[in-house]
Image (cartoon, coloured by chain):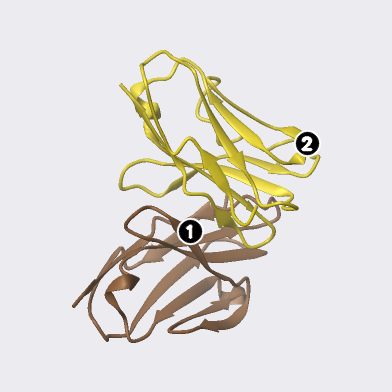
Amino acid sequence: GAGVSQSPSNKVTEKGKDVELRCDPISGHTALYWYRQSLGQGLEFLIYFQGNSAPDKSGLPSDRFSAERTGGSVSTLTIQRTQQEDSAVYLCASSPPQSTFGSGTRLTVV
Amino acid sequence: GIQVEQSPPDLILQEGANSTLRCNFSDSVNNLQWFHQNPWGQLINLFYIPSGTKQNGRLSATTVATERYSLLYISSSQTTDSGVYFCAVSGGDYKLSFGAGTTVTVRA
């Protein structure tokens, strides 16, 4: 596609439920990033995929968070047993080398 | 990881004014980008500029990699320039690290 597409745009979930967030990167982009932005804050790095290399998971805040990228394209970020502190906007970007961001998924855990 | 410091944290401008935003970073970089986050939260890539100078309309940017800083210039500011400006860098690991941002408010 022409840009990075993320779905859903908004997600409200109950504490303890699992959620899946999806990112469709720009076709042909080998690098894909997930970031998290809490209200009024900067961007927190979560995970980075580059081609067929092992992902850099160093930013994942706990083992409740996981991500995969299938076929070097679509990526899914999964949060298990959601907590209220997981509420944030989750942003996906693809590159190289200039990064293009999607519109994000606003996650609210109630 | 590479540390990124942006200044000033907040900037209030009268429409038509010029301004300079600064980004300092702690180590050598192979990637430096400037982004604008509009009031609706969308991040727009302004420049990919690991070194040198680029211009795009009323915006321009300069990165002096040897001295570990980059500058973003906004000329003849407009209300639509309001938002948060982020600098992001990466080194050998290609992981983009973001600064805390500069919040720009342009008043009519």
Chain bearing mark 1: B
Give the residue at the far left of this rendering.
Answer: B108
Chain A shade: yellow
Amino acid under disc 1: Val
| Residue B29 visible in rendering | no
Percent coordinates x, y for residue A33 in the rendering: 60, 45
| Residue A104 visible in rendering | yes
Pointer 2 local density, CA inside 10 Å: few below 14, some 14–19, many at least 20: few
Pointer 1 local density, CA inside 10 Å: few below 14, some 14–19, many at least 20: many
Amino acid under disc 2: Gly
The local secondary structure at tag 1 comes to: strand
Q: Is the residue under label 1 in contact with that under label 2 (CB below 8 Å)?
A: no
Left or right: B51, with B3 as reference point: right
Percent coordinates x, y for residue A63 in the rendering: 55, 20
Q: Which residue is mark 2?
A: A71
Percent coordinates x, y for residue B18 in the rendering: 32, 85
The local secondary structure at tag 2 comes to: helix
Chain B shade: brown
Q: Residue at x 78, y 44 (%)?
A: A51
Tell me, for residue B4, which label it has, or none. Answer: 1
Work out whether disc 2 and disc 1 sit on a shared chain: no
Q: Residue at x 75, y 53 (%)?
A: A28
Chain bearing mark 2: A
- Quarter-of-image position of residue A107: top left
Vertical side of A17 occupied by A55: above or below = below
Left or right: A45, with A107 as reference point: right
Q: Residue at x 58, y 57 (%)?
A: A100
Quadrant of the drawing holding the C terminus of chain A = top left
Vertical side of A44 occupied by B14: above or below = below
